[in-house]
Amino acid sequence: MNASAEAALAAVRDQVSEAEWQVRVDLAAAYRLVAHFGWDDLVFTHISARVPGGDHHFLVNPYGCLFEEITASNLVKVDLDGNKVMDSPWPVNPAGFTIHSAVHEARADAHCVLHLHTNAGIAVSIQRDGLQPLSQTSLFALASVGYHDYEGVALDTKVHAGFDLASTARAPIPAAARGRVVFAGTWRGLSYPQRG
């Protein structure tokens, strides 16, 4: 990264509200926790957070950064159409944006969206019948799981996965995609995905 790009990232805190800065700090910490627990998948999983206010903007990871490299300053601020709404030298992963924008658009109450490829999550998602009531822990989530069949890399919400993905996003949280798992929203009393 060149010197002007580094200076632009350093100035981010001065360009955002205190509420947005706190969301940035919390989201960067979430990225680092996911990396710490081994729930990341190089650059192929994502976490996004809604920016406070009525503009329908959210923060996503800069494409090409590993989760342990994410900082409050290098998160990319985008609108629901994937347009950067604040200068950033980083691109946005189109597949990550597609999934997160569909959820954020469909669920105003989803302040944070996690898309992870954990071993345990993948194992559950590839089962024909998905999550089964085989343990007390599974019962916590069972009543609120919505499914979306895997259709390949999600690049276009309207053509590729659109209606189905948005419909799944409107289902109770969390939502699981057969073939991969998408967890959205908050985990109220649920256990976190386990490293397999």
Image: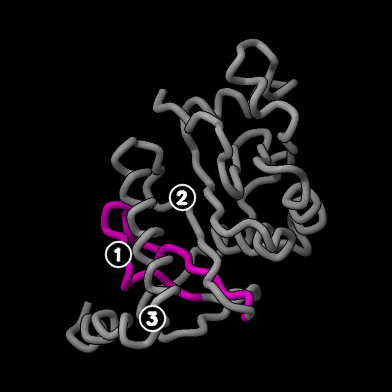
**At label 1, which amino acid type do we have?**
Thr
- Residue at image point 73% right, 35% down: 144
Q: CA distance from mark 3 to mark 1?
A: 13 Å
Q: Secondary structure at mark 3?
A: loop
Packing grade of label 2 (10 A; few <14, some 14-19, many >=20) is: some
Q: Is residue 68 magenta?
A: yes
Q: Nearer the viewer, residue 47 or 1?
A: 47
Residue 33, percent from left and from top: 33, 45
- Residue sticking out furthest to the top: 134
Residue highlighted by disc 2: 44
Q: Secondary structure at mark 1?
A: loop
- Quarter the C terminus occupies: top left
Q: Earlier in the sequence, mark 3 or mark 1?
A: 1
Q: Is residue 69 above or below residue 193?
A: below
Which mark is nearer the camera, 2 or 3?
Answer: 3
**At label 3, which amino acid type do we have?**
Ser
- Residue at image point 58% right, 38% down: 188
Q: CA distance from mark 2 to mark 3?
A: 20 Å
Q: Nearer the viewer, residue 118 or 63?
A: 118
- Quarter the N terminus occupies: bottom left
- The magenta region covers 55-77
Residue highlighted by disc 1: 71
Where, by quadrant of the figure, is residue 73 drawn? bottom left
Q: Nearer the viewer, residue 101 or 191?
A: 191
